[in-house]
Image (cartoon, coloured by chain):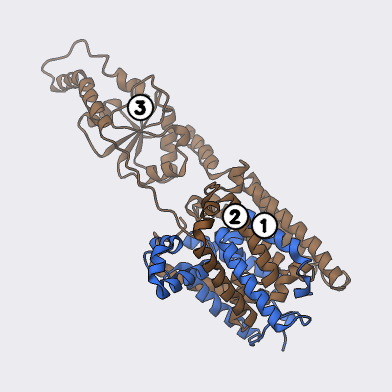
Chain colours: A brown, B blue
Amino acid sequence: MGPFVPDIISNELNLIVALIIGFFFGFILEQAGFSSSRKLAGLFYGYDFTVLRVFFTAGVTAMIGIILLSYLGIVDWDMLYINPTFLYSAIIGGVIMGVGFIIGGYCPGTSFAGASIGKIDAIVFIIGGILGVFVFAELYPYFKDIYVGSDYGELRIDKFFKVNPGIIAFGFTVMAFVAFIITSKIENKVNKISTNEKKFFELPENKPLLVGFVFIAVSLILTFLPTREVYLQNKVERIARNNEIKHINPLEVAFRIVDEDNSLMVVDLRDRSDKRYKTIPGSKNIPFDELFLKDNQNFIKKSPKTIVFVDNQGTLSLKAVAFANEIGNHRTFALQGGLNSFWEQFKKKPQEIDKNDLHQTAYLNFITTAPEKLQILETKYSRDTQDADTKPKKKSGGC
Amino acid sequence: MKTQNNYMNPYLAGFLLGLLLLVTYVVTGRGLGASGAIKSVVVAGVETISPTHANKAEFYKEYVESHNEGVLKNWLVFEILGVVVGAFVSGLIANRLTWKVEHNPKIKTRTRLIAALFGGMLFGLGAQFGRGCTSGAALSGMAVLSVGGVLTMFAIFATAYALAYIFRKLWI
């Protein structure tokens, strides 16, 4: 599952990847005409809207792609670098760059493209850029409060509005489409070209319109896709109803816990507030609702131990096992009868046993002494802090 | 020399750029960028010219500390090297390689160069506050639905439009 850096592609190789990606980036920018400041500036005077077309088509394409790939489980959105939001810094920076854009006619990426084909003004723009960064660096102590202030972290638009990301993508797609139509008309008017002469989208016949509608359709479909969490949840409900789930017997669990068998990991699915029944010593608490969160998914997927899911009745644990199977961990069990049966087994001692039957005496012996041993373990584990989760490192990035 | 009409269809260029951005995210976990490379060059330059200053001033110190493999051994620096080669090849194919100062014939070459220098300075400064430029903050930010990236994008374009009339003599 993407991203491939640093797990599949090493950091060294990544620099080669950077060169290759950069090559295509530069090639496309130059091909689109972004090596010309007068073409770029046309956006602000209505004589050439190339920037808007390229920029929005690229943005919408990548956005729809990320939503789709993330839904299909090919890329993990949470592991991508999401530009953090420092509210005032973001707006102030944008305003300053806007002034720079209208005066300089380039932005950094396009200035490199321009400089590469011999535009001297682009080279001067880059020198200006270097000076600008230098000014910021030298005055950084004065800017720092704004720069690191009003930090909203990795805020995503869809999470901010609490909607499906597909809805945002759909919004952007429609916005881009409308902007393309309006700006073509403006462009024709400014350049005094009659609409009949210049084709609407510069592509033959109605194909461009078709492409536009395909984009809108795809993003519209995305708005109806459930998020991956919801999708998994639904699927798990189905599996739990239909399939046979592997159970583990409460006696076996008790025995292995008392035996301090390290190959076993008990995951308690109850809410943290649920104190009606005590839990099994050494267990990890992951409330069922949080099971679908990325961190917990990874924990379950990568656990080297056999996982036993427990809850009071043994119902949620069925779903949890179905879920674990779905994400690829097949060494998970549901505690049969839940915690109820687990604690119950120590209460109902057999009335009469055959003293000569070793099995029966061992059993009686075990269930009589087990509660006390479990109590000792409980105190022992609560002293050690466990759950040393290691969180995978996120990509850093930015411009 | 052909110039005007052999550019790629903008929607096709945009679609390809979008796919490239998507591939970049899937492979590397990050987006495209440009101003970050300038930042690396500035830090490397200051480090070479005045190491004592680079050790003292907070900005350089923080940057050097977070780039322990060397300031120039940076993803964006390599990416920009690729951009230069890619754009050069494209210009070569399209027969657009020439040394020139491109400007509105109504203004002097000097005016254009001064404007480019100031524009570049402002862009370099602004890209620090925005934590990225049109590529790293606006385009990449939009692709991953970053609130900050999209705010920066709107701020860039809105400001440029708002000031277009004042600076019209530079362009039309």
**Label 2 crowd (10 A; few <14 / some 14-19 / many >=20):** many
**Label 1 crowd (10 A; few <14 / some 14-19 / many >=20):** many
Q: Which mark is residue B155?
A: 1
Task: In the displayed orientation, state which residue is furthest to the bottom.
Answer: B1
Give the residue type at disc 2: Ala
> Front-most of A397 and A26?
A397
Residue A117 vs A79, above or below: the answer is below
Identify the residue under disc 3.
A336
Chain letter of mark 1 equals B
Is the Cβ of the residue at disc 1 closer than 8 Å to that at disc 2? yes
For residue A23, side relative to residue A52 (left or right): left
Residue A10 can be seen, yes or no: no
> Front-most of A294 and B81?
B81
Alpha carbons under labels 3 and 1: distance apart: 59 Å
**Residue drawn 68% across the image and 74% down it:** B115
Identify the residue under disc 2.
A90
**Label 3 crowd (10 A; few <14 / some 14-19 / many >=20):** many
* Secondary-structure class at tag 1: helix
Chain letter of mark 3 equals A
Alpha carbons under labels 1 and 2: distance apart: 8 Å
* Secondary-structure class at tag 2: helix
Residue A72 in the image: x percent, y percent?
53, 51
> Front-most of A66 and A97?
A97
Mark 3 or 1, closer to the camera = 1
Give the residue type at disc 1: Ala
Residue A396 in the image: x percent, y percent?
46, 58
> Front-most of A275 and B62?
B62
Q: Quadrant of residue A313?
A: top left
Residue B143 in the image: x percent, y percent?
59, 57
Mark 3 or 2, closer to the camera = 2
Give the residue type at disc 3: Gln
